[in-house]
Image (tube, grey):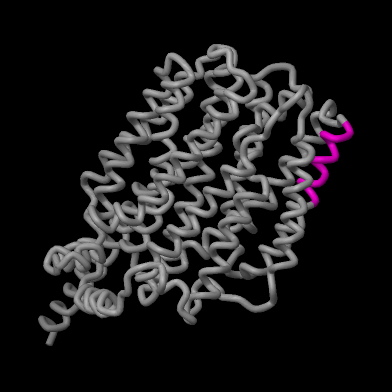
Amino acid sequence: MEQHSSLGTRIKASSAQSSASGRATVVLTAVVAALGGLLFGYDTSVISGAMLFLRTDFHLSDLQLEFAVGIALAGALLGSASAGYCTDRWGRRWMLLVTAVGFGLFSVLSGLAVGLVSFSVARFFVGACIGVASLAVPLYIAEMAPARIRGALVSLNQLAITVGIGVAYFVDYAFAASESWRWMFASAVFPALVLLIGMIFLPESPRWLARKGFRDRALENFRRLGRGEEAEAELAEVESALQEEQEGFGILLQPGFRVAVLVGIGLAIFQQITGINTIIYYSPTILRMSGYPSAKAAILAAAIIGVANVLITVVSILLVDRLGRRFLLLLSTAGMGVALALMGAAFYQKAWKYRGVLRGHRLHHFLWHRPGPGHVAADFGDLPHQNSRQSHVAGGAVGLGIKLGGGGNILIAPPRRRAGGNILDLRWHLCGGLHVLLRLCSGDQGPHPGSD
């Protein structure tokens, strides 16, 4: 009896050790993949400080500077449009490997650019990598994670994006004194190399392998991820879901998905066109206009607000399940509407000379965006990933939302300066109005992430 008891104890201990090792592998996998999100945020934001020096070196007009900033958005639109097909055709892991190479290569080429044309070509392909990463990273993390921690690990991607934005501001600040804008772009090669090396040693998505008919490899990867005795059952569940798959966008209009898809797409578009990217791309420029004595000082002020953005992301992740998505969405959109209206009024009244006022409005805007449109829109976008029975619509629904959101980003992001005047005040009044519209359109009923 003692021998049987001892054997049972050893088996339980071995099982617990295997489970702990599997959880560690899953978390490490999510952290490495989330570097794609960090690069997303970094390459989106790094142009904000670099443009202060890029414009002088390349002798750019207002229109040319706007093109240099906006070309990455066009690349992101192309990347997001092709990401669904590419990840389904060649696999999630391989596309993350390709994306890591692209981030590193074209970030270096951005830093080596000799003029507007070569710079724009490099930034276009950086944007394409951003578009692919916006789909491939959360999809890969969701398909690798067990259901009980899937939502938390997918949220790691959103945190990584905001960390990337903050890191870019501090890198810009580090090179601002020497005006080394080339290193601002080229520095992205370091996290890209870490992502590349890490993905070499990580497994392919078991779900993708099962879809392609590689059942034994899928089962092996489930076990490698610590599923243990649950591996067979989880693989069977995946195979059952795959048998129910339907191809094409038509499934998105079926009664079971129509409302959720429309809400998700609406949030994706609204959270782009309500002004956040104008703030990210032009933070140091706006602060420079508000009276900061140097480009370095303006970039430091932007970096401090970037830190606040990271902190409020952590808070929103902790609060979103407790307070509810709709409550946070309504509260934050109201706050953002007020912040944007005040920023527009500041420019209209020439109040940007009082830099504390404008900086406070910008901080207010960041604090309200992240817990509401920034986080809730991401939750709706990741909803198909977080539910294995709905994962057959993930590529179509999320891809469509990303494409339309990217289109909205292109429309609203580049502030135009014409005929000696500045219409940033009009742009921000418009964004504030869009927030009011978003609040009015947020009805009492609607799908809730995590519900069936």
Please state the horizontal and vertical placement of residue 32, each as a whole percent of the image: 34, 47
Specify whether residue 11 is painted magenta. Answer: no
Q: Residue at x 45, y 72 (%)?
A: 252
Boundaries of the magenta span: 338-349
Q: Is residue 81 left or right of residue 444?
A: left
Q: Is residue 360 left or right of residue 155?
A: right
The answer to whether residue 137 is seen in the rendering is: yes
Q: Is residue 22 left or right of residue 214?
A: right
Residue furthest toward the bottom? 1
Between 58 and 332, the residue placed more toward the observer is 58
Please state the horizontal and vertical placement of residue 266, each as a whole percent of the image: 59, 62
Q: Residue at x 26, y 60 (%)?
A: 205
Please state the horizontal and vertical placement of residue 437, each as a whole percent of the image: 74, 61
Q: Residue at x 38, y 52 (%)?
A: 137
Q: Is residue 166 left or right of residue 330?
A: left
Relative to 431, does residue 227 appear above or below in the rendering?
below
The answer to whether residue 17 is seen in the rendering is: no
Residue furthest toward the front? 419
Please state the horizontal and vertical placement of residue 152, each as a whole percent of the image: 46, 62
How many numbered dots are placed on residues in this image? 0
**Quadrant holding the N terminus:** bottom left
Between 3 and 356, the residue placed more toward the observer is 356
Q: Residue at x 41, y 74 (%)?
A: 251
Q: Quadrant of residue 249?
A: bottom left
Relative to 28, does residue 121 appear above or below in the rendering?
above
